Amino acid sequence: MDDDRAIVAHHGFGYAETLDLKLSAPLAAAASHAHGSSNRRSANKGAMLQEAESRLKALFVRGLDGDADAYRSFLQALTRHLRAFLRRRIPHYRDDVEDLVQEILLAVHNARHTYRPDEPLTAWLHAIARYKLMDFFRSRARRESLNDPLDDYAELLADTDDEPAQARHDIGKLLEHLPDKQRLPIVHMKLEGLSVTETARITGLSESAVKVGVHRGLKALSALIRGLR
Amino acid sequence: MKTDDLIGLLSNQVTRIERGAVARRFTKALLLGALGSLILMSVVFGVRHDLASVARTTIFWAKMAYPLAIAVGAMLAVMRLGRPGARAGYSWAIIALPFVAVWIASMMVLDSAEPGTRLPIVLGHTWRTCPFNIVLLSVPTFPAVFWAVKSLAPTQLRLAGAVAGLLASSTATIVYCLHCPEMSPAFWSVWYAIGMLLPAGIGAWLGPKLLRW
C-alpha cells in the first residue's frame, strides 16, 4: 500500500506540518537561492522536532502521574498535530479526519500504560497513529469493495463544507450502549468530574470497581467506534 | 461529541498509571496457565515414575532449560512487541539461542552414533505423539497468554500472535518435561521444536483476530 510506505518514510509525524509554517518565513528567501540552505533547514527542523518531543513528553509523563491539567494540554497539542498529519496523509477522506483524530486520542489514552519514559514519545505516538490509520484503510477497502458505485455520486452531492472538523460518530451517544457498571463511572468521573470516592458512593460500586469500569468502558468505546467503520 | 469534549472526558479525573501492572498480569497469566497444563499433564499423561532419580541428572535440567530459555525470550519479545514503536531487539537472540544450542548438541550426538542407530535416536519412542501432546498442554496456557498480551497494544498483530503462541507452547513444554521420557537432544531438536512451533503458527493465524484494538 502506497500510504503505508509514505507513513513509514515520514517518521517526523505531525510535527513537521505545524513547524513548516514557522520555518517558511525566515527561510523562504534563503531557500530560493542559497546552496547550503536545505542542510540548515533540516538541522533547524530537527531541533524543533526535538523541542516538540521534549515539551509533549514532559506533559505526557506528568499526565501518567495523574496530573489532569498537563494531560489535557498534551491531548490538545496532540490533536493539532494529528489533524495536520491526517489531513496530509488522507486528503481523499477529509470527512474521516475528525473521527480518526478522536479514535487515535482514545487509543493513545487506552494504551498510555505501554509507554516507557526511556523511549522517544514521538515513535510511540507515531506507531499508534499508524496502526489506527492502517486499520482505517483496511476496513475502508473492505467496505468500498462492497459498495455500489452509485453511492459515491450521492456522497459527492451530499457534501457540504459546513463544519469540516465535525466528527461523524458521536462518542457521547455511543456511551449509552455501555453496561451501567462501565457507563456510570465514566459519566460521573469523566463527564461530571467527580472523584473516585464520590463516584463509588453514588453508584454503590467499590473504588476499584469504579476505576476498572472507567478503564474497561473506554476500551469498549474504542471497540464500538471500530465496529462503526 | 466534539473533539474538545473528548479531550475533557479523557483528561478529567485521570488516574495515576500503576507501574508494574503489566508484569503482574503476565505473572498471573503464566502461573495460572502453567497450573492448568500441570493438572492436564498429570491427569492425561501422568508424571514420569523415575522423576526423583532423573532429577539428579544434568541432562534432565538441560532439557528443562531448553523450553525455559525459549519462554524467557518469547516473554521479553512479546512485552516489547506489545509496546507501540519499541523494537524486539536482542530478545530474538534469546529465542533463537536455545534452538541453535540443541541443534548443535543433536549433531554432536548423531555424529558420534553408529550410522544405523541415528534414525532411531531422532525418533525415540514417542515421536508420533510428542508434538501433539505439547499442543494439548498449550490449551490452558494459550488463552492465558493472549489475555495478558491483550492488556498491551501490539501494532504487528501477526508477529505478536506468533510470539504469544510460542510463549504459551514453551511454557507448556516445561510442564511436559515432567512426563516425557525422551532424553536425547536429537529428539528434542526435532519433535519439541515442532510441538512448540505449531501453537506459534496458530498464534500467528489468530493474532489479527484476537489482538486487534
Image: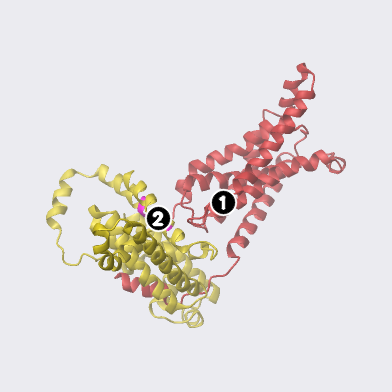
Dominant SS type (magenta)? helix
> Residue shown at 80%/19% (left/top)?
B114
Q: Residue B120, can we see it? A: yes
> Residue shown at 33%/52% (left/top)?
A136
* Amino acid type assigned to the residue bearing label 2 in the image: His
Q: Tell me if residue A105 is in the magenta stretch.
A: no
- Residue A24 screen position, x and y as percent: 27, 65
- Residue A20: image quadrant is bottom left
The subunit letter for the residue under badge 1 reads B
- Residue A151 screen position, x and y as percent: 17, 48
Real-space Cα separation, disc 1 to disc 2, in angstroms? 23 Å
The answer to whether residue A66 is above or below residue B52 is: below
The hue in which chain B appears in the rendered picture of the protein: red
Tell us which disc is closer to us: 1 or 2. Answer: 2
* Amino acid type assigned to the residue bearing label 1 in the image: Val
- Residue B104 screen position, x and y as percent: 71, 32
Magenta stretch: give its range: A128-134
Q: To which residue does mark 1 refer?
A: B78
The chain displayed yellow equals: A
Give the crowd class for mark 2: few <14, some 14-19, many >=20 residues within 10 Å: some
Local secondary structure at mark 1: helix
Local secondary structure at mark 2: loop
Q: Quadrant of the N terminus of chain B?
A: bottom left
> Residue shown at 48%/51% (left/top)?
B211
Most foreground residue, A113 or A197: A113
Most foreground residue, A17 or B51: A17
Q: Are marks 1 and 2 in contact (CB under 8 Å)?
A: no
